[in-house]
Image (cartoon, rainbow, N blue to C red):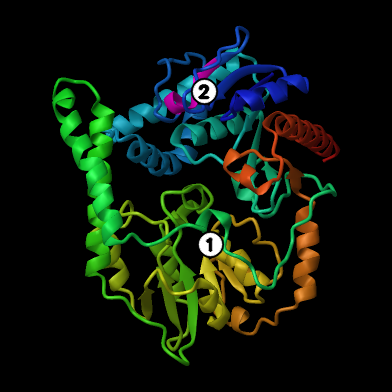
Amino acid sequence: MYLLAGFNATMFEGFRNEGFEIGAWIQIVEKHQKLVKPEDVETISWRDFTLCKVPHTFAADMDPAFAKRVRERAYPYFIRMQDRMYWYNFERTDTWLDTVNLLESMIHYFYALIKRNDISTVISTNVPHEGPHIILHFVAQELGIESILTTQSLVPNAFWIIKDIEDFGYFQTGFPKTGVSLPVKKEPQRPFYMANVQRSTSSEYLKFLMKYLPKIGLNFLPYLLGFRKRSFKKSLFKLDQKRRVRQILNSINYDTPKEGERFIYFPLHLQPEMTTDALGHEYCDQLLALEELLRKVPEDVYIYVKENPKQSGQMREASFFKRLQALPRVRYLPREVNSFDLIKESLAVATITGTAGWEALQMGKPVITFGSAWYRSLHGSFEWSDTFKFEDVLSFEFDYTKLEAGTVWLSQYLREGIVDPVYSVLKEDYDASDNARIVAREVLEFIAETQKKDQLN
């Protein structure tokens, strides 16, 4: 029996039509649509799930040692991921105990959900980067049942499948298959999701104020009376975010690249995001990665840091910049500086798991990865560790044929289909129902083949 975590109604039907017996479903509901509740499937909405708004459960038969193992694995992920969901939904926890109560409640809930529905496999639409989702993943693993994680790739109409977050980039839990190719471009293009990102102008800011100030006034009285709380908080939050971003941008003293200076390019990730919160592990704290890197590079090497063009004021509080400014040999560059030019002139690129790392490899530059980057096994990629030596990066000789051979190997772990609808724009004549059928077949084949592999092992 399967548990689907995060798929919409079209994907659900695709899985069912391919013979999946589904016992539980955490359903993504599209805008202006209602929750679909099949009679034979225990169903909750994705939004309620992310906010921990599920029936309170006490799993009397759960071993305390089991709960402790899940708690210890999930807690650091949960606190940072759940903070993200509170920001997005404009709700907050009150105390540390409030967070702990939610964590413990979700451990009980998922344990009982899996048991009463006789779940043998959990299939997720993405790498968990919402608090409850990571708990579900660890509960499944501790129970010894399969946790299948699908996540979209940058290749049009292709996605990855893994069984463990830390296996992303290694794919030791998968099986090779031909069909999809990972293209290598010596002159990579800007990703489609960054195409229309621009710095806001004064006129745009005025339009923003005209949109949200009336909403704040309109919703203030209903908020005091207990209605439209989220609408009021959202408008106030948006206004404060915009104010903080403008204040920060106007107060920062930016550096500029210096001709002839040796440097490592460190592009900051958008946060909060899966690439840091989940795949970054402890280096979701990007400044920790920067601090550790500084200790291992020569005194004449600088680090050029550039902000992500999509970053808001969230997770860029004053404390972030005070900590950043304390670091020697770090130049904080304006967002407008061309990223490809920085890659081209750098000694290397350092990133948690970012796309800039893949762009650098295609451009023949070595990359230092701090997290579970999908390209971290490729020629030219150096994984950060206690034994990392920057001398290895400096002496590295790039061989493009080895990179291309590596991408052929890596392509074997790509699967046809789209599991994140945002990426459907990359496929011509996209049909949601056909795509759902294709994805379901790919997942079914993955499960069958990995089970054979496990039995042989």
Q: Residues within 10 Å of mark 1 (few under 14, many from 20)?
A: many
Q: Position of residue 78 (x, y in %)?
A: 42, 39
Residue placed at 26% from the left, 42% from the top? 211
Q: Secondary structure at mark 2?
A: helix
- Image: magenta residue range: 43-49
In space, the residues marked 1 and 2 are separated at their CA atoms by: 31 Å
Magenta-span inclusion, residue 179: no
Which amino acid is tagged 2? Phe
Q: Which residue is mark 2?
A: 110
Q: Is residue 39 left or right of residue 15?
A: left
Residue at the top extreme, as displayed: 39
Q: Are marks 1 and 2 in contact (CB under 8 Å)?
A: no
How packed mark 2 is, by other alpha carbons closer than 10 Å (few <14, some 14-19, many 20 or more), is many
Residue named by callout 1: 370
Residue 99 picture quarter: top left
Residue for point 64% across, 61% down: 376
Note whether 259 is above or below 346 in the view shown: below
Residue 95 visible, this orientation: no
Instruction: Label 1, secondary structure: give it.
Output: loop
Residue 420 image point, x, y percent? 60, 40
Residue 45 lies in the magenta stretch: yes
Q: Is residue 69 left or right of residue 313?
A: right
When the figure is inspected, residue 134 is found, relative to residue 189, above or below; the finding is above
Residue closer to the observer: 71 or 370:
370
